[in-house]
Structure formats: structure tokens, C-alpha cells
Image (cartoon, rainbow, N blue to C red):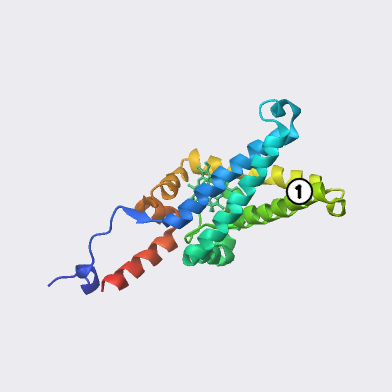
Amino acid sequence: MSTTSPVRERTAPASPRIRRFTGAQRVLHLILAVTFFGMLWTGLCLWSPALAEVMNRPLAKQWHFWFAIALGVAFVGILILRPRDVSAFAKEVDTLDRADREWLKGGVRRIVSHDGAPEQGWLNAGQKLNTAITIALLIVLTFTGLLLWLGEQNTTFRFTGTVDVHDIATILIVALTCGHLYLALFNRTTRASMSGMIDGTVDREWARANHGRWVAEVEAQTDLDQS
Ligand code: HEM
């Protein structure tokens, strides 16, 4: 007598890769990365007289502006064309459940002890916080950037401190992005996530170890679809 469950008999063997991000999510991330570094470079040229020799201020200002517009247009465009891909991601970031709170509680201790983390969903609590803070800082940068641009046309929009807030938000987002790049490119346990942003898939066993609840949910859904 066979001990295999009927569902398992019908199910094709799981691929060693699992889909993590859709095409639209990857395109939006790529545009975010390109425009972010574009705005950072042109912003540095506006800030530093030495770099203004490499790219003059009027040109840097123009590019700075157009990178910001490109990011805004890409975001709205993908929201219109692929609303489900954006809303699935937003919904994930918006939920901070018990596993997330446990992950956050042990976060600092785990850096030293290397203990295993509590099982996580699609994104872990650190990634959710990273996304939320990055979005908040991008909103602050957009708003203060808009005031700076309007202030050049009309003095009513000039406020003391606008440049300082823009600069502080820049420093914070650069610090956050340095941490993000370290985890994506160098950290041994997390760098396997990189392929998720290239071809959309990651190693299933890596995902199981780092985002176990998410893999279980995807596999349960696949079993249901195939039954
Ligand atoms: C070339 C530079 C970059 C690389 C190599 C990179 C890599 C990655 C990777 C591999 C992921 C997926 C992580 C996962 O599977 O869970 C990711 C997600 C993400 N990236 Fe990037 N990224 C870059 C630039 C940026 C920039 C400039 C920003 C924002 C300023 C950003 C914001 C995010 C956010 C919000 C997420 C989702 C949450 C997270 O994983 O923290 N990325 N990135």
C-alpha cells in the first residue's frame, strides 16, 4: 500500500528555484536603484564645488530634476499597469505580525550570537522597516526638493531649513542603502537573494531557511492549484 498522499502523487516535483519577485517589481526596483544613484551623484555635484568641476551646476540640477521625475513616472506607471504587483508588496510591508516582533526583539542579539531567526514570511521585519523608512525618506526628499525648485521661481516658497531637511534625509537614506547593499551583495546568509532581483527566482532551500513561512504558503498554494 502506498503511503504517499493523493495530493503529492498529482504534484510535479518542486523546482529547486522559487519565484520571489515579478517582472514589474524587478523593473521598479531597477528604476529605483538607477534613479537613486543618479540623484545621489547629481546632488553631490550640486553640493560640492570640487565635483561641480566634473559636472557643472546647471547641468547637475537638470539631471537631478529629471531623475526624480523618472522615478515618480515609473512608480505611477507600474501602479497603473500592474496594480496587483505593487499592492501585494505594499500589503506585505504593512503587516507587522508576532513573528516580525520576535525577529525585531532578537535582532541585535542575533548579530552577536548567530542564533537562528524566528521563521519569517515573504519579507522579514528588517526588510519591512527598510522599505517603510526608505519610502518615508523618498517622500520627504520629494517634498523638500519640490519646495527648493518652487523657491527658485517664487520667493513665497522659500523657507529656512528646507535645504537642511533635504540634506539630513539624504544622509539617512544613503546610510540605509549602504546597509541594504551590504546585505544584498556581501553578507553570506543574505546575498543569495540577489538572483531574485535579476531573474526573479531564488534557491528554494535558501528561501526555506530565511523565509520559511512564505515558502510554506507558496507551496500550499501550488498544491491547491495542481489538485
Ligand atoms: C545596485 C544596487 C542595489 C542592489 C544590488 C539591490 C539589491 C536588492 C535585492 C537583492 C533585494 C531583494 C531582497 C529579497 O529577496 O528579499 C532588494 C530589495 C529591496 N531594495 Fe534594493 N538593491 C539596490 C538598490 C536599492 C536602492 C538604491 C534602494 C532604495 C533607495 C533599494 C530599496 C530596496 C527595497 C525597499 C527592497 C525591498 C525590501 C528589502 O529587501 O529590504 N534598493 N534589493
Q: Residue at x 45, y 53 (%)?
A: 210
Q: Nearer the viewer, residue 147 or 136?
A: 147
Residue occupying the point 53% across, 48% down: 31
Foreground: 62 or 188? 62
Q: Quadrant of residue 40?
A: top right
Q: Give the left or right position of residue 87, taking residue 209 as reference.
A: right
Q: Residue 82: percent from the left, percent from the top?
A: 47, 63
Residue at (70, 30) in percent of width and height = 56
- In the picture, the quarter occupied by the C terminus is bottom left
Q: How many marks?
A: 1
Nearer to me, 95 or 135:
135
On the image, which quarter does residue 19 sit in? bottom left
Q: Can residue 148 be seen at all in this image of the molecule?
A: yes
Q: Residue at left 66%, top 52%?
A: 138
In this view, the residue farthest toward the left is: 1
Q: Position of residue 80 (x, y in %)?
A: 52, 65
Label 1 SS: helix
Where does residue 32 sit, x and y in percent of width and height? 56, 49
Is residue 103 visible to us here? no
Displayed quadrant of residue 73: bottom right
Amino acid type at mark 1: Trp
Which of the pair 40/215 is nearer the observer?
40
Task: State left or right for residue 97 relative to residue 197.
Answer: right
Coordinates of residue 164 in the picture (x, y in percent)? 80, 45
| Residue placed under numbered mark 1 in the picture | 149
In the figure, is residue 109 to the left or right of 199? right
Q: Which corner quadrant holds the N terminus?
A: bottom left
For this orientation, the residue located farthest to the front is 153
Ligand 1: does it lie within 8 Å of the C-beta at label 1? no
